[in-house]
Amino acid sequence: MRFLIIGIVSLISYIVCAQHGQVADVKIQGVQNLKAGFVQHLVALKPGMALDSVLIEKDMTRLKRLPSVSHAYYQVFPASDAQYNVFYNIEENFTLIPFLNIYTSTNDDFAFRIGLQEFNLLGRNITLGGFYQYDIFNSYGVLFRAPYLFTNKFGLAFDYKDLTTQEPVFLDTSIGQDALYRYNNKGWELLGLYEVNFKNRIELGYSLFTEDYSYLSGATDPNVPQELNVDKHLIKLIYNYDNIRYDYQYLEGFRSVLNFQYVGSNDSQLPDFLIGFNDFSYFHKVGHKGNWATRLRLGFASNLNTPFAPFTVDNNLNIRGVGNTIDRGTGAIVLNTEYRHTLVDKDWFVMQANVFLDGGSWRNPGGPLSDFGQEQNIRIFPGLGVRFMHKRIFNAIFRIDYGYGVTKGDSRGLVFGIGQYF
């Protein structure tokens, strides 16, 4: 009944808009932790403007994208003399969120990341958080992200990380030789965030970091150092096109995220290189309870013949069940597709089941494009999963996925995490 009333009010507002009424005031309702002044600063509709239903709908979508908002709708009421009051009604999320990701497989890989993030610091949609990670070794990081720090279009992000993992280094792909290295990446990154318009965002940033490789075990090669400590710098450009519409757990539309980086080094053993990848995501609601989700990643880096290639095959990044960093390459083509079906949908709780197919292929370091078609480089993992969601807590989606490899030599495993996989 509630949504029927909202629909009728929205229909009336469309008729009002056709009569070219004027906005007397934009009132924000339902906010508690989110600052009403921040919302009024963010939305496009202002007092004195012509009443425009298209602009209002864009504001609704913009608000639903905020981590602090679980749902938003509007109402229009006459004021006087062809003027109207517009009410933006907001249902807030709880935004102080712990998170946990766990990865395990039949290769006895086990890793987890645990952390805490506040997504609405000071009531202004500012994110502040930190994490601890165990993946053979200990790691941690902190982040700050304020997309509307200066204006309703311009903000900043900063993060610091000290990541240490055990990484395979593939010395001779033709005979399958590899070694294990202790890898540490320590450094900071500063990004400028700019919203071009409703659908397009740009991020431009700079990073200074140090990479440290220490040999642990396995094969050796006189041309590959066993100890390597390199200072690096990075210039990053991210272009985000977002045309996704949100309705609680259901998504509809298309998104494209391009990430392009130049990485400079002070050591010829890890030379400068370029890397770029684009994630294309498409979501489609199926019936009343279904959602089809697909992500395609295309990525290429400078094709250097190095055992420290940038693209990895990993549980957490691209293929559920495959294990933790089982291969590397200078190019990647990865497709993740899944069907999500809502089994339970209550006032605050949602339970979904999903069936998925993750697949991908990689180009060997220094290899030709034909590497993508080589059997040993292809991974295909179908699987099943379940999601438990809280509608009033941002990103409160606990997921469990089980992926089973069907290509030669593949493993299988569970992947636990917070938030949808993509």
Image (cartoon, rainbow, N blue to C red):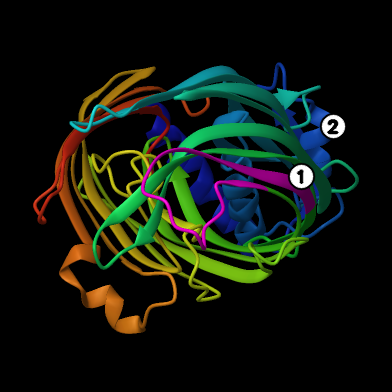
How many labels were placed on the picture? 2
Indicate whether 158 appears above or below 379: above
Q: Read off the residue under disc 2.
A: 37
**Residue lying furthest right:** 150
Question: Element type at marker 2?
Answer: helix
User: Do we see residue 365 in this rendering?
Assistant: yes
Residue 147's tag is: 1
In this image, 208 relative to 342: left or right? right
Residue 338 pos. (x, y %): 23, 49
**Type of the residue with mark 2:** Gly
x 79%, y 28%: residue: 36
- x 52%, y 46%: residue: 10
Q: Where's residue 45, x and y in %?
A: 76, 51
Report if residue 392 is visible in the image.
no
Mark 1 element type: loop
- Rendered view: 86 above or below 342: below
Q: Callout 1 environment at 10 Å: few (<14), some (14 to 19), or many (20+)?
A: many
- Residue 245 drawn above or below residue 18: above
- Give the quadrant of the N terminus: top left
Looking at the rendered structure, the kind of residue marked 1 is: Pro
